Image: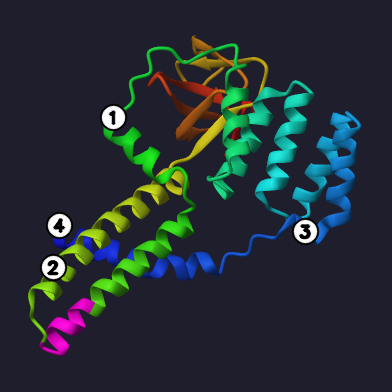
């Protein structure tokens, strides 16, 4: 069982960069004039118009951290906390190392009128998130590929060339450890960022119910900007998990998926 898991991680580390390198992310630079115009509207404090201008570029298929970041700023300035946090998170997914994105996201979240108290996070999970959070998934995948190549080269030296001194043996062990660690972190990042569905409450009034129907009792009141994990969906409702581990059902149109 462990052997199969390690084998799958090695394959993931080798193949994932190839898949990611083929992913086209259109830069806002291809829409320079529209982007500059949207920035002008923002500087002129015409935030509603700026939001429309940025959104128009996105609707044309453009995706960039700077575009999402600026749109988040415009939403924040016009008092739409939910959409501001949504676009900060989308920007952070594309450029997790950007300090401005991180600081604005943390600053905006402080304005939520509902704070998730009693949060009890898995310490191991939190530690792994802190390790992978500053890096893009493709950066981790390329690092894993480099470790795989290094490990493979040491195997060639050992078994292909027949060199079996202590340096080679230590190199094989260290390369294997690096490979296991890097592929594990890459897999964790991939699952956390792409396999886990997350959303942000964007509506001012967001009742969270005990069941997926209008007749269900209200479990709690959500607020714009709260981040949830989307567990399942039934009809017009999402079953969501809050950061303090409380669960409930919320109408889909009240949540925007990250």
- Do the CB atoms of the residues marked 2 and 3 lie less than 8 Å apart? no
Crowding at dot 3, Cα within 10 Å, few <14 / some 14-19 / many 20+, comes out as few
Judged by its main secondary structure, the magenta piece is helix
Real-space Cα distance between discs 1 and 3?
Answer: 41 Å
> Residue drawn at (63%, 37%), measured in percent from left and top?
100
> Residue drawn at (24%, 72%), measured in percent from left and top?
151
Which residue position holds label 1?
123
Task: Read off the magenta span.
Answer: 154-162
Horizontal and vertical percent position of residue 224: 62, 21
Give the quadrant of the C terminus: top right
Horizontally, residue 135 falls left or right of residue 152, namely right
Give the quadrant of the N terminus: bottom left
Depth check, mark 4 against mark 1: the one in front is 1
Horizontal and vertical percent position of residue 114: 55, 12
Horizontal and vertical percent position of residue 132: 40, 46
Horizontal and vertical percent position of residue 86: 62, 34
């Amino acid at each position: 069982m462990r052997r199969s898991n390690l084998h799958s991680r090695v394959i993931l580390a080798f193949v994932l960069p190839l898949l990611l390198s083929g992913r086209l992310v259109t830069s806002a630079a291809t829409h320079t004039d529209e982007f500059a115009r949207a920035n002008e509207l923002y500087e002129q404090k015409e935030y509603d118009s700026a939001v429309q201008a940025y959104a128009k570029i996105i609707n044309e298929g453009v995706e960039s951290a700077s575009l999402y970041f600026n749109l988040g700023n415009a939403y924040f300035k016009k008092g739409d906390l939910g959409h501001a946090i949504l676009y900060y998170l989308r920007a952070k997914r594309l450029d997790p190392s950007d300090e401005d994105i991180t600081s604005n996201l943390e600053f905006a979240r402080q304005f939520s009128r509902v704070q998730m108290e009693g949060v009890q996070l898995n310490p191991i999970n939190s530690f792994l998130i802190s390790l992978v959070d500053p890096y893009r998934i493709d950066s981790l995948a390329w690092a894993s590929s480099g470790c795989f190549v290094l490990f493979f080269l040491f195997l060639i030296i050992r078994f292909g060339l027949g060199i079996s001194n202590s340096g080679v043996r230590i190199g094989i062990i260290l390369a294997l450890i690096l490979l296991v660690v890097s592929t594990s972190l890459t897999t964790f990042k991939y699952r956390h960022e792409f396999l886990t569905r997350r959303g942000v409450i964007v509506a001012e009034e967001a009742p969270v119910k005990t069941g997926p129907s209008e007749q269900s009792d209200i479990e709690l009141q959500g607020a714009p900007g709260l981040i949830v994990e989307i567990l399942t969906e039934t009809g017009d409702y999402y079953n969501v998990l809050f950061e303090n581990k409380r669960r409930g059902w919320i109408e889909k149109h009240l949540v925007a998926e990250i």
